[in-house]
Image (spheres, rainbow, N blue to C red):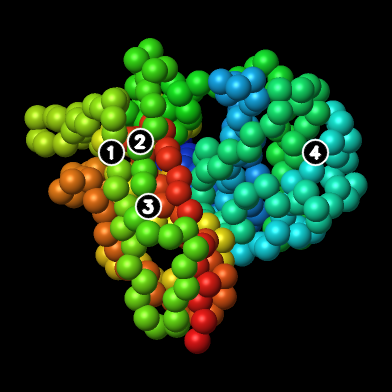
Amino acid sequence: MMQDNRRNYFSYTVVKTSTILAAALVFIMGATALNAQTMFMQLRGQITSPAYEGWWPNDDGSFKLFFGYMNTNWEQQFDISIGSENYFSTVDAGELDDLSVDGYDFSVADRGQPTHFYPRRNPFLFTIDVPADFGDEELVWTLKTEGQVNRAYGTLKADYRIDAQVISTEVGGNFGSLSDSLRTNIPPDLRVEGESFRTARVGQPLSLAVVASDLDNLPARRDAPMGRNGRIYRPPSSIVAMSGPGLRFSWTIYRGPAKFATFNPAQFKTYTDTRMYANSPWAPPFEIPMPPENGRWTAEVTFTQPGEYVLRGIASDGSLFTYRNINVTVSR
């Protein structure tokens, strides 16, 4: 009997110890997962990195280079004026590989890049044309945030050549489709009504209107996949978030502090915020709205602080983008 009790005690001790170890393991795994999620969902305090997206040839023999950026914060936005912390340089290959080397030259620093940086991935945001004899040179974008310098190196290396299908794939267009038909896709046609340079006063709404159309209807508008119980929003099968096809338009602040500008109606996000109900085409359960009558989008913007602003209107068919800017001088 004594032996049986010892055996039972031993078994109980083993079970109890195993339970404690299992609980500890669950706690550690849970804490690790929570920490990993926290690390992944940094709201602020992280850097923004410029991104070189690739190039394609123009009909006249020159080349078009595409740039964007990745703000690793989920909420923090940056305003970085053209200058020693936000500039372009054209250099020989490798000349600015050392991040400690200063390549700032005021005369060539501004190549149309943004000065306001929204959160998350903002791909294929602007383009720069380089001449046919650009050769092995590099067009380098230097950006400094949170005290850290990062660079994107625009080159004509063969493996950076892209086409319309590559762009669609990179932005998760057409629900992540890899259809060869996307290679012939053309971006939407976009026309801004009114002048490109305007004035406004603090607190007084400024009217905006554009006309956009998708001339080739490619990719064709379609709903998200349907399941037995309604719409299914599947996670992306790759590291790229997905959005649906269909013509859409939205205003953003391209230069100037966005916190001092309010659009009415509120504009959906043009960056890849994938959180639920984030008012972003990449965020479930967002549905691409139907274009307004005659393809004419209207809105108002009101500023609370004077200054120089650049508004950027972005039309997209879900795969390619067309941009138009309005420069606004706001006074009291």
Q: Determine which of the numbered discs, if any, sits on residue 98 in the image.
A: none
Q: Is residue 259 above or below residue 81?
A: below
How far apart marks 2 and 4 lie (CA) works out to 31 Å
Tag 3's secondary structure? Answer: strand
Dot 2 corresponds to which residue?
Answer: 188
Residue 64 position, x and y percent, is 61, 30
Q: Is residue 300 above or below residue 290?
A: below
Q: Is residue 148 left or right of residue 199?
A: right
Q: Residues within 10 Å of mark 2 (few under 14, many from 20)?
A: many
Q: Which mark is residue 90?
A: 4
Against 182, residue 288 (above or below) is below
Q: For the residues marked 3 and 1, what is the alpha-carbon distance in whole angstroms?
A: 12 Å
**Nearer to us in this view, 11 or 110:** 110
How far, Cα to Cα, is label 1 from label 2?
Answer: 6 Å
Horizontal side of 325 relative to 175 (left or right) equals: right
Real-space Cα separation, disc 4 to disc 3, in angstroms: 32 Å
Q: What residue is pinned by disc 3? A: 192
Label 4 CA crowd tier, 10 Å (few <14, some 14–19, many 20+)? some
Find out whether the residues at labels 3 and 2 contact each other: C-beta distance under 8 Å.
no
Q: Is residue 150 left or right of residue 163?
A: right
Q: Secondary structure at mark 4?
A: strand
Asked if disc 1 and disc 2 are in contact, CB closer than 8 Å, the reply is: yes
- Look at label 3 and name its amino acid: Val
Where is residue 44 drawn, in percent x and y?
A: 57, 62
- Please give the residue where the numbered disc 1 appears in the rendered image: 213
**Which quadrant does the N terminus fall into?**
top left
